Structure formats: C-alpha cells, structure tokens
Image (cartoon, grey):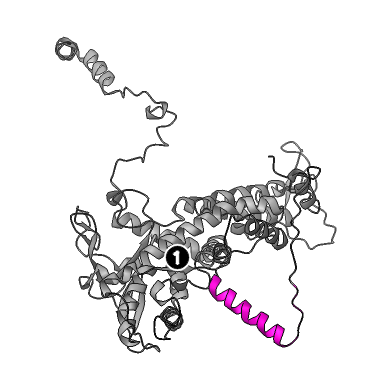
C-alpha cells in the first residue's frame, strides 16, 4: 500500500550510483507484449514511430516531400506509371452511366409522354461527354494514387457546348493551402475550415500553383464554400482531413528495384567488356620486364598480343546474377502492388504462368477493391455532381421533379464498365446456372457487364422482332449445363489449364 512512499525514501537515502539504477528501473516499460519492449535489436527499426494525430503526422511539409517523391517516381518509373494508368482505367473505365429510377416516371403515360427518366439519362450522358467527365475522373484517380488526394471545383462555364453550363474544374492539391498557417487545429487543417463536428465548411484555394511561374503573390487565395468542392481521398485514420499517396509505402521499393536493375545491367556490361589484369610471379629484382603500376594497353579484337616478359594475363570475371534477377523482380513487384490491391500479372503486365483458376482467384481481391472505390466515388463525387446538375437541368429542360432540396435523395444508380472474364465459355455456363436456379437476376447479371438490363432487353426485343419480320431464323445457343463429373475434379482441370505452361503449378486446395 505504501510502496510508492518506500520508493521515494529509498531514492533519498541511496547513493548517487544506486539512485541512477533505481531511476532506470522506474523508467523501464512494464509491458505485457513483446512488441512493446525496446531492445538493442529493434531500437533502430522503431526509432521513427510516433504518437502524432492523423493531421499532425500528415502536416503540410511532410505531405509535400512525399508527394514530390511520388510524382518523380511515377514520371520516371515505367512500372509505377503503368500501375497508376491501369488502376485509373479499371476503376473509371469509359465513365459512369446514370440510370434514373423514378417510379412516377417509369413510362410515357404518367409523364405526358416525356419519359423523364430517359430524358435525364440522355442529357446527363451528353453533358458528361461535353465536359469530358470520364477523363477528369481518371485524372482524379491518378492524382489520388500519386498525390494522395484530388480536388474538383463545381463552377459555371458559359463556353460549354451544352444547355447545362455546370462544369468540373480540377486543381492540384498543392493549391489547397492557407499561407502562413501550418499547425492544424480542431477547426482548421491546411486550407480546410471545419465546423465543430469536423465537417468541411470552406476551402482556401491559392490563386496560382505554388510551383507556377505566375505564383508571384503567395498570400492571395480564394475562399470557396465546401458545397462547390469535390475532395476525394482515402481516410486511413479517424480525424484525417488530408490524403497521402496510395503508393507511399512502395516508394522505397521502387528505388530499390531500380537500383537492382542498374546493378544487373552494370554486371552484364562488365561481363561483355574485355578486362585483363596482368600479374607476375617473378621475385623482386628478377627478369620480369619493368612495367609501371596501373598502366594500360590497348589491343584490337581477333589479334594476338604479346605481353611484357614475365607477366601473365588473366581476364576479370564479372558475376552476373541472371538466375535470381527474374525471381527478385517478381517479389519486388508483388510487394509494390500489394498496397494497391493489385495482382502481380496486372502490375507487371505479364500473365505468364497463370491458368484460369489462379487468374480468377488472384483477381477477386482486385475487383472487390475496385467496387469499393467506385462506391466511394459515387458517394463523394458523382451524387453531388448529379444533384448540382439537376438543379440547373430542371430549369433548362422544364422537368417537373420533386423539390430541389430532395434531389440528392432521388432514386438512381450508376453503371460502370464490366470486367472481362478469362474464360467466357465457363462464365456463360455459370451465369445460365445462376439464372436457372433463381440465385441471380437479369438486372444483376447485366450490371456486372456495366449495362442497363431494361435497355438491353428492349434492344433485344427490337432485334427479334426485326428478325421475324425479315424471316431470319432465331437460334439461341444453349450453354452446357451438365455439372462436372466426380472423375474430373478441379485439381485435374488446373493441371490441364497449366499443361501448356510448366512454370505454373496448380494451387493446392
């Protein structure tokens, strides 16, 4: 009970050497987990670990250094550039497609023949093409990968070739900053003004980019309401207000991969060059010719050259790690692509060694990550863009819709490009079985391909009607619905798929 008093008294009466030992023992962490102990072996590894908050750790100067390094790597490393381009193409593709689901406008009878659902969908698609919305979304995805965040400003563009003059202007995250203020507060974080609940209220946008030649007035900035700003980033920690690059954990690996490649090239060049080292076994003062140290001698290929008397030539052998280069490079790319949830064959652009089963398995995590990002983009950007577009479109096209304040809750959905399968025949059989067993719907199956099921069925009905009118035969190929026999398990199928490629072994069950 009085142990604390005893410790104080012990420190008071103890000698100088004893008191230091007691203080050292008191400062020792009484941890119950191995990872909480600091030893001589792990001291350097955990030297930079801190307890800073999310906004304090990602302060402006830190983000600037990481951002500049990520941009440099993407600009000079073909793998980094290819991964980011592939990621933007897979997440955004040809762009999102809108489908309105207003029940009171489901046909042309209740809306006076205007077909409001179809009108909104057509005009929004035309507007998206006029402002190049798919291209801007792809740029935003690339910026989020290398810069950590992407910003877009909703503004009026009278030069736009569409009745709706709403436009999306992209700016780099460097411009969202407040000069002369660097320390984050509960209501302010580097260019973002927050309310008491942590919601963005205003954004401070510099007049010019800090790295631009026109940036002569660094203290000038515009204050833009949060309703007109699209801020897309991944929030990794609670309370985080600014984003960090997606490829940030892989930046040291990119540098090591380039160093390893250059080392292999240097070894190959040394092996290809002819380098000869002259040595002699003659004793000092012997009969060997007098050759100055570090002297060189040129000779042409395919020519016999006689060296100095008493000297023996030997060629320098450069070691070439050709047997481990491919393996090391594969492991580097595997680890680099992991922070993007990207499989190796997509990151490397090489599917050698993949069969159907392993390809499908490795792509499941990647496709799930893409669906998560698309859903996040819909909530952060697309729904807000649609709401702002409808506020202007209802006046331009004289559409009778619910109150403008409820536009954000109007039923709708977004369609994205579908993903092609490795084996279309096997996927078609699986799709037919799902429909036959009522475990899926046509809407779900068409949505996986990025298509609207109503539009596709109406188009198919018109095609069938025209074929009947022209007297053309209507033949529908039926997929094979026979289940796999027990004599042909999946392991055997994997072996057959990998038969043409002995480098890829079937995965164990």
At 45% from the left and 73% from the top, the residue drawn is 98
Q: Observer-nearest residue: 350 or 385?
A: 385
What is the span of residues highlighted in magenta in the rendered image?
Answer: 452-475
Residue 451 horizontal/vertical position (percent): 55, 70
**Quadrant (top left, top right, bottom left, bottom right) of the N terminus:** top left
Q: Main secondary structure of the magenta part?
A: helix
342 shown above or below 37: below
Residue 407 visible somewhere in the drawing: yes
- 168 shown above or below 270: below
| Nearest the eye: 429 or 440 | 440
* 98 with respect to 10 (left or right): right
**Residue receiving disc 1:** 141
Q: SS for tag 1?
A: helix
Quadrant for residue 411, please give it: bottom left
Q: Is residue 94 left or right of residue 61?
A: right
Whether residue 67 sits left or right of residue 297 in the image: it is left
Horizontal and vertical percent for residue 65?
A: 37, 57
Depth check: 396 or 269 in front? Answer: 396
Indicate yes or no whether the magenta region holds residue 453.
yes
Q: Is residue 350 left or right of residue 64?
A: right
């Amino acid at each position: 009970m009085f142990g604390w008093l005893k410790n104080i008294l012990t420190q008071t009466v103890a000698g100088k050497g004893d008191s230091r030992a007691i203080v050292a023992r008191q400062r020792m962490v009484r941890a119950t987990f191995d990872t909480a102990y600091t030893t001589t072996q792990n001291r350097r590894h955990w030297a930079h670990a801190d307890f800073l908050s999310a906004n304090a750790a990602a302060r402006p100067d830190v983000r600037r250094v990481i951002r500049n390094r990520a941009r440099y790597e993407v600009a000079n490393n073909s793998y980094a550039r290819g991964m980011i381009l592939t990621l933007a193409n897979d997440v955004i593709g040809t762009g999102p497609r809108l489908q309105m689901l207003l029940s009171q406008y489901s046909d042309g009878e209740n809306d006076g023949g205007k077909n409001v659902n179809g009108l909104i969908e057509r005009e929004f698609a035309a507007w998206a093409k006029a402002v190049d919305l798919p291209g801007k979304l792809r740029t935003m995805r690339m910026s989020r990968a290398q810069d950590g965040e992407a910003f877009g400003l909703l503004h009026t563009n009278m030069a736009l070739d569409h009745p709706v003059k709403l436009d999306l202007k992209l700016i780099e995250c460097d411009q969202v900053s407040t000069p002369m203020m660097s320390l984050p507060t509960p209501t302010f974080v580097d260019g973002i003004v927050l309310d008491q609940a942590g919601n963005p209220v205003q954004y401070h946008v510099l007049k010019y980019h800090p790295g631009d030649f026109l940036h002569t007035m660094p203290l000038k900035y515009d204050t833009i309401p949060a309703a007109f700003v699209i801020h897309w980033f991944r929030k990794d920690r609670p309370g985080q207000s600014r984003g960090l690059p997606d490829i940030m954990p892989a930046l040291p690996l990119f540098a090591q991969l380039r160093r390893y490649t250059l080392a292999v090239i240097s070894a190959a060049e040394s092996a290809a060059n002819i380098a000869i080292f002259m040595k002699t076994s003659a004793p000092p003062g012997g009969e060997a010719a007098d050759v100055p140290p570090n002297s060189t001698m040129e000779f042409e290929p395919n020519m016999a050259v006689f060296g100095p008397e008493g000297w023996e030539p030997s060629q320098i052998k450069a070691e070439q790690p050709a047997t481990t280069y491919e393996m090391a490079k594969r492991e580097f790319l595997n680890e680099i692509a992991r922070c993007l949830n990207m499989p190796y064959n997509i990151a490397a652009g090489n599917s050698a060694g993949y069969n159907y089963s392993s390809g499908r398995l490795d792509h499941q995590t990647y496709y799930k990550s893409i669906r998560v990002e698309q859903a996040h983009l819909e909530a952060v950007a697309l729904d807000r863009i649609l709401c702002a577009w409808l506020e202007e479109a209802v006046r331009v096209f004289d559409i009778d819709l619910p109150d403008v304040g409820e536009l954000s809750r109007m039923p709708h959905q977004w369609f994205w490009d579908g993903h092609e399968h490795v084996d279309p025949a096997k996927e078609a059989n699986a799709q037919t079985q799902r429909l036959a067993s009522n475990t899926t719907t046509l809407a779900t199956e068409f949505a996986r391909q990025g298509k609207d099921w109503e539009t596709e069925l109406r188009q198919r009905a018109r095609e069938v009607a025209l074929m009947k009118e022209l007297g053309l035969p209507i033949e529908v190929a039926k997929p094979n619905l026979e289940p796999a026999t027990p004599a042909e398990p999946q392991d055997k199928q994997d072996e057959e798929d990998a038969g043409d490629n002995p480098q890829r072994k079937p995965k164990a069950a």
